[in-house]
Image (spheres, rainbow, N blue to C red):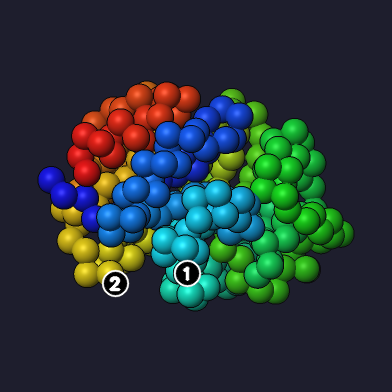
Amino acid sequence: MKIKLLASDIDGTLVNDEKEILEQTKQDLQLFMKRGGVFVLASGRPTHGIARYIEELELRRYGGYVISYNGARTFSVRIGELLSQKSISPEVYPAIFDAAEDLNLPLTAYSSHDVAVTEKANDDYFKMETTVNRLEIQRVRSLRETLTWPTPKFLITGTPDFLSDAEIKLRDRLKGLPVCVFRSEPFFLEITAIGCDKGTAILELAERLRIDRSETMACGDGFNDITMLRAAGIGVAMANAQTPAKNAADFITLSNNDNGICFALRKFA
C-alpha cells in the first residue's frame, strides 16, 4: 500500500521518553517528505507547544501540517495559514462551570495566543503541561467571569484514579451538550467541541489535499489517538501504547524509544 499522508502524535510516539526525536526517526520522516509524502503532527498540545518539533523536522521547508488541541486547530506550516478551527461555544460554558464546581474539577482554558488561563489548577500535572509546552499562565479570580472567548478546549488535571471517576461523572453531567469528554492521558481530562478529534481532523485534511483515506496512516499511543487510529487507512499503535489504543490499531510497531514510527513507515510506505 502506498501511503501519501502520515499523521503522528508527539508524546509517546514521535519523541522518546526524554521528549527528543531520535535521529533515525528524523531522517526517515524527512525522506518521506522529500519523496512527496505529507507529514502531519497531530497532538493534544497547544500549537505553541509544537513549535520545537516543527523546527527540528523542518516542516516549513518540506510543507508539513499541524493539528493541535486534539483536532481543534489545523494549519499549514509552509504558508502559515489556519485551515480549520473548532472551538467550544460560550453558550455551553455555564453548564461546564457548574459541573466543574460541583465535582471540584480545576478547569484550564486557552486563549487565542495559547495562554493557559485558570482559576484553580496548580498540581504537578498542570505544571508539567505548562512547562513542557512553554506556556504563559494567566491566573484569574473567576474563570466564569473572565472567559468570554471561544476556547479550543478545557483541560482538567489530576491523578489517574481521580480522573477516572471524574470522567464518568462529567460526561454524565454534560450529556446532550455539543461537547466531547475524554482523557488524552491518564492524568489529563479534556473537553472539546463535538466532532473535534484527531480522526476527524485528519480525514478533513486528507480530503482537502485530495488524498484517499486508504492512502493515510496514523501513529499514536494514547487515549486521544484512538479516533485517528480508527479513521486512517492504517492505524499504528506504539509498543508502549495504552491498551485501548492498541485495540483500535491495525498494527503494533516498536516503542517510541526504538524508532517505532520508522519501523511502520518502512513496512507500509
Q: Is residue 130 above or below residue 60?
A: above
Closest to the observer, 49 or 88: 49
Q: Quadrant of residue 95?
A: bottom right
Q: Amino acid at mark 2?
A: Arg
| Residue under numbered circle 1 | 78
Looking at the image, which residue is at 61% across and 66% down?
A: 151
Closest to the observer, 69 or 52: 52
Looking at the image, which residue is at 69% across and 53% down?
A: 108
Q: Is residue 180 visible?
A: no
Q: Is residue 263 above or below residue 82?
A: above
Q: Earlier in the sequence, mark 2 or mark 1?
A: 1
Quadrant, the N terminus: top left
Q: Amino acid at mark 1?
A: Arg
Name the element at disc 1.
Answer: loop
Q: Please state the horizontal and vertical placement of residue 113, each as a whole percent of the image.
A: 68, 67
Q: Please state the horizontal and vertical placement of residue 224, each as a whole percent of the image.
A: 44, 43
Separation (CA) of disc 2 from disc 1: 16 Å
Nearer the camera: disc 2 or disc 1: 1
Looking at the image, which residue is at 79% across and 47% down?
A: 120
Q: Is residue 40 above or below residue 269?
A: below
Q: Please state the horizontal and vertical placement of residue 263, each as a whole percent of the image.
A: 30, 31
Q: Is residue 90 left or right of residue 127?
A: left
Q: Is residue 31 left or right of residue 52?
A: left
Closest to the observer, 5 or 92: 5
Q: Is residue 205 above or below residue 213?
A: below
| Residue under numbered circle 2 | 208
From this viewpoint, which residue is outermost toward the right?
Answer: 141
Closest to the observer, 17 or 248: 17
Q: Please state the horizontal and vertical placement of residue 48, each as a whole percent of the image.
A: 64, 58
Looking at the image, which residue is at 47% across and 25% down?
A: 257
Quadrant, the C terminus: top left
